Image (cartoon, rainbow, N blue to C red):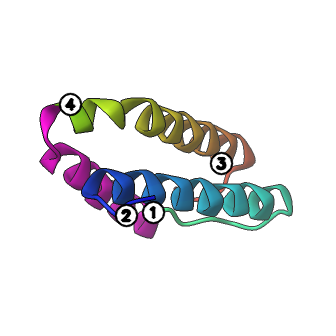
Amino acid sequence: MTSTPQNAVLAAVDELHGVLSLAEALLQGGRDLDLQGLEREVGTLCDAALALPREEGRATRPALAGLLAQVNGLRSRMSRAGSGA
């Protein structure tokens, strides 16, 4: 795969999916979570996606929407578990 800014955004999304999966496992194991660092990473990722040419940015929307759904699901489970946000 050729290294492009769009591919870098998509790779970062994949990496964050892994981080969120680990966070899910930790939460299920009873650990408290702090998502401040994750929020910064997501902000940086969104900035990078917005900097892409319009069509390339649009092509990242499904991946970003999936990431958002995973983050929202984790936040919901954290609220139910009484973990910090």
- Label 1, secondary structure: give it: helix
Which residue is under mark 3? 78
Give whichever of 55, 30 is nearer the camera.
55
Q: Amino acid at mark 2?
A: Glu
Instruction: Kindly identify the residue that appears in the image at 68 percent across and 50 percent down.
Output: 82
Q: Position of residue 27 (x, y in %)?
A: 75, 58
Secondary element under disc 2, as helix, strand or loop, is helix
Mark-to-mark CA distance, 2 and 1: 5 Å
**Which one is earlier in the sequence, the residue at label 3 or at label 1?**
1
Kindly report the distance in space between the C-alpha atoms of the residues bearing marks 4 and 2: 23 Å
Q: Are marks 3 and 4 in contact (CB under 8 Å)?
A: no
What residue is pinned by disc 2?
41
- 3 or 4: mark nearer the eye: 4
- CA separation, marks 3 and 1? 14 Å
**Judging from the image, what secondary structure is the residue with disc 3 in?**
helix
Q: In which quarter of the view is residue 83 placed?
A: bottom right
Which range of residues does the magenta coloring cover?
36-54
Q: Which residue is mark 4?
A: 55
Depicted 34 relative to depicted 69: above or below: below
Q: Is residue 12 left or right of residue 82?
A: left
Indicate whether 80 appears above or below 41.
above
Please report contact status of discs 2 and 1: CB closer than 8 Å, yes or no.
Answer: yes
- Three-letter amino acid code at the position of disc 4: Glu
Q: Nearer the viewer, mark 3 or mark 2?
A: 2
